Amino acid sequence: MSVNLSDTSTWLPLDGLAPGFDASKAELSHDLDGRTFTVVDDRGTRIVHTFGDGTVSWDYQPGAGDDTAATAQTDACEVIRVDEDLYYAQFHHDYLPNEAVSLILDLRSGYALAVLSVLGEKTREHVAVQHLFGVGRIQELEQKGEPPAPTGELIGRRVLWVYSSVHAYEHLYLSPHWYTWQCLAGPEQGLADTDENTVWRVRPGIYVFTWREKVIPCGSVTIADHRDQKALRAHGVLFGEGEGATATHFTFGAHGRLLSNTVHPAEYDPARALER
């Protein structure tokens, strides 16, 4: 019996993908337990994060021009050590279940990158999940080197990502705005699409890669270590609309390798869009 891969009404909902997808998730870290980090951005907005055993207590105080209300809460939190003095913290707001936070803390550079995932309604102008990016200084640390910044360094790479013994995908990074994915193994085998992406450079060879899907109302935030092309490593979250009444939120990990790399002539380089 043939399957109509173009019939997107048959594609799995987000929570249908979840079982087993987290098989390669890294061991959680407790390095930050009992520590406090205050992230301050250019507006003067201050967010104090205090980490506990599986929790983060945060206090948001808006600066000039920030119309977000002052708020404080404690959320369940997962922390993963990405590299020496580099941590990825993931938490899903209790009081606003349509929002989730991915916080990258670089204790070596003294900078933080926060990615807010917001689940809303799909419109003609944008997909259902939107990502908001914010760079801040970690007040307790000295700032050294360059802060995180958008980059086109992944453009042209074709990468195999294996999430479990069942799930495998390839990614082709096309431009600052688009990437193509194809499922090579797993319940979505044979499916492929081109979706929005945004990439930030955190350290040399380490990137925050985010994507936002148009068929399934979901988005993802990952931090990926590309320094060893034969042994890539990624950690991330999928967040969006499932079949239940509340947003679906789950973390995962992946091992990867570079399959190929396309180098465009300078005059046709898609990365030039970042310079405009």
Image (cartoon, rainbow, N blue to C red):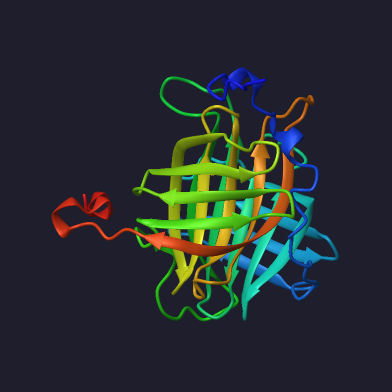
Nearer to us in this view, 226 or 240: 226
Left or right placement of residue 264 versus residue 145 in this view: left
**In terms of image quadrants, where is residue 7?**
top right
Residue under the point 69% across and 34% down: 14
Q: Taking 62 as reference, is 227 above or below it?
A: below
Q: Position of residue 152 (x, y in %)?
A: 34, 58
Q: Taking 4 as reference, is 68 above or below it?
A: below
Residue under the point 74% across and 55% down: 165
Q: Residue furthest left?
A: 267
Q: Position of residue 31 (x, y in %)?
A: 76, 76
The total of numbered circles placed on residues is 0
Residue under the point 61% across and 41% down: 69
Inspect this view and state whether residue 99 appears.
no
**In terms of image quadrants, where is residue 187?**
top right
Inspect this view and state whether residue 30 appears.
yes
Q: Position of residue 114 (x, y in %)?
A: 56, 56
Q: Residue furthest front?
A: 1
Q: Position of residue 223 (x, y in %)?
A: 57, 61
Left or right placement of residue 148 versus residue 160 in this view: left
Left or right placement of residue 155 versus residue 57 in this view: left
Residue under the point 59% across and 77% down: 107
Nearer to us in this view, 183 or 123: 183
Quadrant of the frame with the N terminus: top right
Nearer to us in this view, 203 or 62: 203
